[in-house]
Image (cartoon, rainbow, N blue to C red):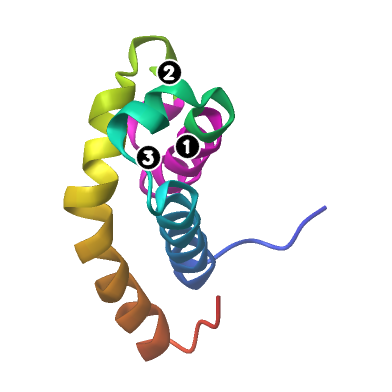
Amino acid sequence: MTAPRDFRDFLRDMVLACRSMMRFVDGMSLEAYLADEKTRYAVMRGFEILGDAVRNRIVHGYFGIDDTILFTTIERDIGPLLPRLEALADAHGVRP
């Protein structure tokens, strides 16, 4: 049996998922991303982890995922979100 998880564990998961997704698409164009099945699946997994930590619909609605939206979301939203999550994690002694 695993120990119960608290909010710090979920913060760590969110920070690590955001970092991974940003690293996966670093330097890629949308066209290159769409042509790279492995990267698309890796990004989808990152969103699943992030989504599970915050109960996002991507985890259960994977059949309706638009890869263009996922890629655009990393550039537009995950980049600005990561420093906030890192600051919150740091404030609570979380070391991802």
The first of marks 3 and 1 along the sequence is 1
**At 33% across and 11% down in the image, what residue appears?**
64
Does the segment drawn in magenta span residue 8?
Answer: no
Position of the C terminus by quadrant: bottom right
Instruction: Inspect the image, locate mark 2, and give the three-letter code of the amino acid beneath it.
Output: Tyr
In front of the other: label 3 or label 1? Answer: 1
Question: Which mark is drawn over residue 83?
Answer: none
Q: Residues within 10 Å of mark 1 (few under 14, many from 20)?
A: many
**Residue 8 % position (x, y):** 48, 72
Looking at numbered disc 1 in the image, what kind of residue is underneath it? Glu
Residue at the spot of label 1: 48
Q: Secondary structure at mark 2?
A: helix
Lower position in the chain sequence, tag 2 or tag 1: 1
Q: How far is disc 2 from disc 3 in space, using C-alphas?
A: 13 Å
Instruction: Name the residue type under label 3.
Output: Arg
Give residue 15's position: percent from left, percent from top. 43, 65
Residue 95 vs residue 59: left or right? right
The range drawn in magenta is: 41-59
Specify the quadrant of the image occupied by residue 14: bottom left
Label 2 sits on residue: 62
From the image, tell me which residue sits under label 3: 55
> Dot 3 surroundings within 10 Å: few (below 14), some, or many (20 or more)?
few
Q: Residue 36 at x, y = what percent?
A: 50, 27
Q: Position of residue 12 (x, y in %)?
A: 50, 68
Q: Confirm or deny contact between disc 2 and disc 1 (CB under 8 A).
A: yes
Q: Nearer the viewer, residue 26 or 10?
A: 26
